[in-house]
Image (spheres, rainbow, N blue to C red):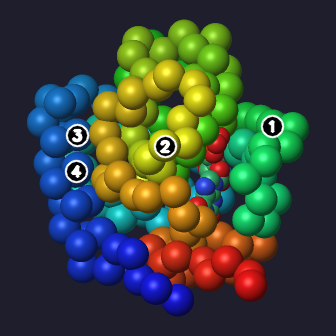
Amino acid sequence: MEVLIPADRIQRRIDELGRQIQHDYAAQPITIVGVLTGSLIFLADLVRRLDLPLRIALIQASSYRGATTTPGALRIQADLVPDLRGRHVLLLDDILDTGQTLSHLIRHLETLEPISLRIAVLLRKLGRQSIPLEPHYCGFEIPDRFVVGYGLDYNDEYRHLPHIAVLPTPS
Ligand code: XMP
C-alpha cells in the first residue's frame, strides 16, 4: 500500500500537538474522550505527551461499514463516558470526513454540561465536509482517499500499522 504519512512524521506531529494542548490547557484538569475504535492509537500516543491532570474516557460512534463513503445510521454508545459536568473536555477522533460523526458527538457531549468542549482530529479529509465544524487541533489534512493504519481500519484490519496508508481501490 502507498504510504501517505510515515510513522516518524506522525510522531513528530503528535509531539507538536501535545505541546500545543499542554500550553492551551495550562495545567487545568481535562477529560479526553476518545472515539472508538479509530482514535485508540492516537489517544495512547497523545496522552503520554501530556503532563496535565487528565482523565480518559471512551465513546463509540459508528456510521460507516468497510470502505463505503455512504454514511449509514449513526449509533452512539456512551456507557464508558463518566460524569463530564464541570470538566474541560477534549473530544479526540481519528478522522474528520463529512463531519456527521463529530457533530452528533458534540451535540451529545454538550448535554453533559462540560465547562468547555474542544475537538482534536488526527486527519481531516479535504473536500468532503458537509457539516461546518472547525477542529481546534488537527494533525494532517489529507486528500479524499480511503486511508488505513494508525488506528484506521478497513473491515477492522490494518489498525496496527504505524503509518497512514492509502487503501487501493478495487479495479
Ligand atoms: P464523518 O463523515 O462522520 O466520518 O466525518 C468520520 C468517520 O468515518 C470513518 N472514515 C474513515 N475510516 N478511513 C477509515 O478507516 C477513511 O479514509 C475514513 N474516512 C472516514 C471513520 O470511522 C471516522 O471516524
Q: Is mark 4 within 8 Å of ligand 1?
A: no
Q: Is mark 2 within 8 Å of ligand 1?
A: no
Q: Earlier in the sequence, mark 1 or mark 2?
A: 1
Distance Cα–Cα, label 1 vs label 2: 21 Å
Q: Position of residue 43 (x, y in %)?
A: 44, 56
Instruction: Examine the image and state in which quarter residue 53 appears.
Output: top left
Q: Position of residue 171 (x, y in %)?
A: 74, 85
Relative height, residue 7 to residue 58 (above, below)? below
Q: Is mark 1 within 8 Å of ligand 1?
A: yes
- Indicate which label's residue lies in the foreground, 2 or 3: 2
Density class for disc 1 (Cα within 10 Å; few <14, some 14-19, many ≥20) is some
Q: Nearer the viewer, residue 155 or 50?
A: 155
Relative height, residue 124 to residue 111 (above, below)? below
Q: Is residue 141 visible?
A: yes
- Indicate which label's residue lies in the foreground, 1 or 2: 2
Distance Cα–Cα, label 4 vs label 3: 5 Å
Q: Residue at x 47, y 50 (%)?
A: 125
Distance Cα–Cα, label 1 vs label 4: 30 Å
Q: Earlier in the sequence, mark 1 or mark 4?
A: 4
- Indicate which label's residue lies in the foreground, 1 or 4: 1
Q: Position of residue 116 (x, y in %)?
A: 39, 16
Contact, mark 4 vs mark 3 (Cβ under 8 Å): yes
Q: Which mark is residue 74?
A: 1
- Amino acid type, callout 2: Gly
Instruction: Examine the image and state in which quarter residue 71 appears.
Output: top right
Q: Earlier in the sequence, mark 1 or mark 3?
A: 3
Residue corresponding to mark 3: 21
Residue corresponding to mark 4: 18
Q: Residue at x 70, y 73 (%)?
A: 154
